[in-house]
Image: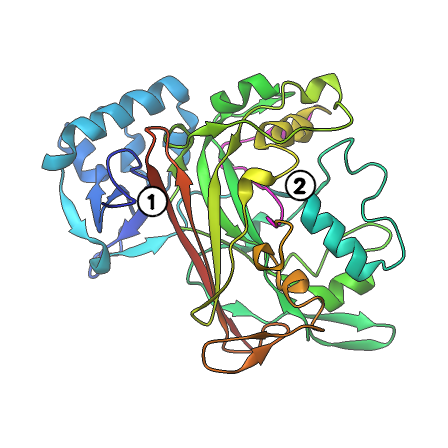
Amino acid sequence: MTLFGLENLPYGVFSTPGDGVRRIGVRLGDTVLDLSRAEADDLILAGGALQQPSLNVLMSLGRPQWAAIRARIVELAPALPAIPLGDVELHLPFDVADYTDFYSSEHHAANVSRILRPGGPPLRDNWKQLPIGYHGRSATVVVSGTPIERPAGQLGAGVFGPTRRLDVEAEVGFVVGVPGRRISTADFAEHVFGVVLVNDWSARDIQAFEYQPLGPFLAKSFATSVSPWVVPLSALAQVPPPAQDPVPQDYLLPPGPAFDVRLRVEWNGTQVSTPPFAQMYWTAAQQLAHLTVNGAVVRTGDLYASGTVSGPAREEAGSFLELTWNGERPVTLADGSTRGFLLDGDTVTISATAAGADGGTIGLGEVTGTVCR
């Protein structure tokens, strides 16, 4: 049984050796179906959207067109041109318009408070009133496999240099297709095209020195990695979200669906954690509503991420800050070496499966990156 069957069909952008032309395809098993060629041969009618070098035009068409094109792909899949996955190069699947990162795991937020603000309250007073977030840099969103250069910055008063506490954040990202402003939670699925995996690389020592009073800046802006496959939102099963207390403001209701995504984090090939996305306190629909409630516009290609996904157990931590408790409790990898934070040459891979809309299990692929100097 494949995690990338007809019930999934995630979209991506690929090229083949020799021509370098970027084309749109979907993954079926261990092959890529060439949708650009299929539309050029008049097998699929998409107004030229499938003959673009990115998914943006396709994503802008809206939900009825997404459904119609997807149904046609399912119908034609056995006859569409297929290329072995190992014979293609995968690229950033969409042009990122803007990037926003949220902070929506109660377990992660409480852990970070205990580590960075010992003696203070686990959650700030406003944390359960609104989805906390910050604006990142779209220019530094990169596709899985891109090397991650160790960032430098101020590590403390009078101290400048490369980060000594490079970390990961295992997240789920949502890709906007249809632009809008003041989007209600009920209209979430009309605007969001699909889902990617996200690693929001973080320099914890730079972050600790700079984040008060305004929040993350250089500690976050150097790189954010995303998976090369955009799983259509319609392929995911919707599950009830966790209870929220106190009851949120009206614009955050109804809360919208949660999604049963099960992440896995590997450090140099050793599985170190399995963060549970279904436990996130704030839903993706509430995040989008909050992002736009002040009149801010989202555009085709906007990416917003869930924030670090963490559960209550140590082995469910979505960051190494939590997993090693700021380096005080190192993890042992399969080769016998120990780690508190990332060393040069270390590779982190985040993968995930999810409950599919058809009742089965689908794959979200993986996002990987190797640290270099």
**Is 141 or 349 nearer to us in this picture?**
349
Tell me which residue sits at (70%, 28%) in the image: 244
Tell me: 214 left or right of 345. Answer: right
Three-letter amino acid code at disc 1?
Gly
Per the image, label 1 sits on a secondary structure element best described as strand
Residue 44 seen in this snapshot: no
For disc 1, the marked residue is 12
**Is 160 or 360 nearer to us in this picture?**
360
Using the rendered view, name the quadrant where residue 358 is placed: top left
Farthest residue in the left direction? 79
Tell me which residue sits at (34%, 40%) in the image: 361
Query: Residue 171 location in percent, x, y?
Result: 55, 48
Q: Which mark is residue 104?
A: 2
Lower sequence index among marks 1 and 2: 1
- Local packing at callout 1 (Cα closer than 10 Å; few below 14, some 14-19, many 20+) is many
Residue range corresponding to the magenta coloring: 295-310
152 within the magenta span: no
Tell me: 59 left or right of 162. Answer: left
Three-letter amino acid code at disc 2?
Ser
Tell me which residue sits at (22%, 47%) in the image: 29
**Is 136 or 270 nearer to us in this picture?**
270
Tell me: 125 left or right of 194. Answer: right
